[in-house]
Image: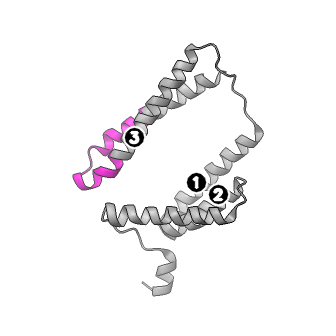
Amino acid sequence: MRQATLETSVALAGAVLSGWGLWHALSFTRDSAYLPTAVMGLLTLLLLVWGIRSAWALRQAGSDTLRFAPGHARRFLTLLATSIAMIAIAPSLGFATTFLLFVPLSGWLLGYRQGKWLVVTAILFSLLIYLIFQIVLDRPLPPEMALRLVTGS
């Protein structure tokens, strides 16, 4: 199987799914539709561009044969498992705490060994989440478990 064939299929399937997500986000109330509509719209556009570029590569004779490297499959499965765990744990642990724990853990499991940059990235992601919800959307995040334990509320 040629790599461009797989990429075209994945990009177009993703574009259909994100297009459905965009259509669904447009039905939200005005205040809550802004961010999901923007994200899904951008995702749909990028997937369509990827699909078109991959389809164009299909037309050219130089498309590479798809090869699976064992290390790439292990990394993908590691990222998938940590992402599922992060999504499952985030509502009870708190979103900022989850990012502070899982971004460095995921990076470490994927083979990145510069701990300082993993921690800096986790802090920046947590800060970004806070800013998006508190400042841009004016919506509070659920309370963090650590804060609930300390404050007793």
In the image, 69 versus 90, the foreground residue is 69
Mark 1 residue crowding within 10 angstroms, few (<14) / some (14–19) / many (20+): some
Q: Type of residue at label 3? A: Leu
Q: Give the range drawn in magenta.
A: 16-37
Mark 3 neighbour density, 10 Å: few (under 14) some (14–19) many (20 or more):
some
Front of the two marks 1 and 2: 2
Residue lying furthest left: 30
Q: State the residue position of label 1.
A: 83
Identify residue type, mark 2: Ser
Q: Do the residues labelled 3 and 2 touch (CB within 8 Å)?
A: no
Query: In the picture provided, is 135 more to the left or to the right than 12?
Result: left
Residue shown at 53%/25% (left/top)?
8
Residue name at image x 65 percent, y 17 percent: 62
- Amino acid type assigned to the residue bearing label 1 in the image: Ser
Q: 5 above or below 150? A: above
49 in the magenta segment: no
